[in-house]
Image (spheres, helix red, strand yellow):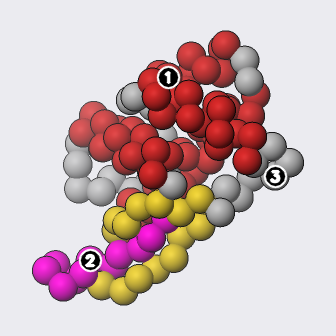
């Protein structure tokens, strides 16, 4: 896993949370979360899009090992990969949106460019 942020969770819970958030992000194309989580999600989502651009069965199986829903993996390999076919990285954008009222956590919006 990239990054060194522990996000207040043990390793197995953190990996499961990041897998689910990357899956939801790739499904919707946009997500509002904390800044630290957004910074962890971005490289993982970009890795999945890069796998989608490879268009092979080994890449598809590797993506399915990380993405939690098969319909999202098909979307990555079909729609999203063709959208970014000529782009070499930089598929995501993180925009800070201020602090959350309840716990004063820094929030951000992560979206596909």
In-front residue for pair 111/106: 111
- Nearer-N-terminus badge (3/2): 3
Q: Is residue 69 above or below residue 84?
A: above
- Nearer-N-terminus badge (3/1): 1
Residue drawn at (42%, 41%) of the image: 23
Q: Can residue 49 be seen by looking at this rendering?
A: yes
Residue drawn at (39%, 46%) of the image: 24
Dot 3 falls on a residue whose secondary structure is loop
- Nearer-N-terminus badge (2/1): 1
Q: Is residue 67 above or below residue 4?
A: above
Horizontally, residue 38 falls left or right of residue 60, namely left
* Cα distance in 3D space between marks 2 and 1: 32 Å
Residue drawn at (73%, 47%) of the image: 83
Which residue was labeled with disc 1? 64
Give me the disc on residue 10: none
Q: Please rate how many residues cluster around mark 1, counting C-alpha atoms within 10 Å: few if below 14, some from 14 to 19, many from 20.
A: some
Asked if marks 2 and 1 touch (Cβ < 8 Å), the reply is: no
Horizontally, residue 105 falls left or right of residue 109, namely left
* Cα distance in 3D space between marks 3 and 1: 23 Å
Q: Please rate how many residues cluster around mark 3, counting C-alpha atoms within 10 Å: few if below 14, some from 14 to 19, many from 20.
A: few
Horizontally, residue 61 falls left or right of residue 91, namely left
Horizontally, residue 111 falls left or right of residue 68, namely right
Q: Please rate how many residues cluster around mark 2, counting C-alpha atoms within 10 Å: few if below 14, some from 14 to 19, many from 20.
A: some
State yes or no: residue 101 in magenta: yes
Which residue was labeled with disc 3? 87
Residue closest to the far right = 86
Give me the disc on residue 105: 2
State yes or no: residue 35 in magenta: no
In the image, the segment drawn in magenta is 100-110
Dot 2 falls on a residue whose secondary structure is loop
């Amino acid at each position: 896993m990239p990054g060194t942020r522990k996000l207040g969770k043990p390793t197995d819970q953190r990996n499961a949370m990041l897998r689910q958030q990357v899956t939801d992000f790739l499904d919707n194309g946009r997500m509002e979360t904390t800044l630290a989580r957004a910074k962890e999600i971005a490289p993982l989502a970009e890795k999945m899009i890069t796998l989608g651009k490879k268009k092979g069965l080994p890449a598809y199986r590797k993506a399915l090992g990380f993405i939690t829903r098969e319909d999202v993996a098909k979307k990555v390999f079909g729609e999203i990969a063709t959208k970014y076919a000529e782009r070499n990285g930089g598929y995501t954008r993180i925009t800070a949106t201020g602090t959350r009222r309840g716990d004063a956590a820094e929030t951000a919006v992560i979206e596909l460019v």
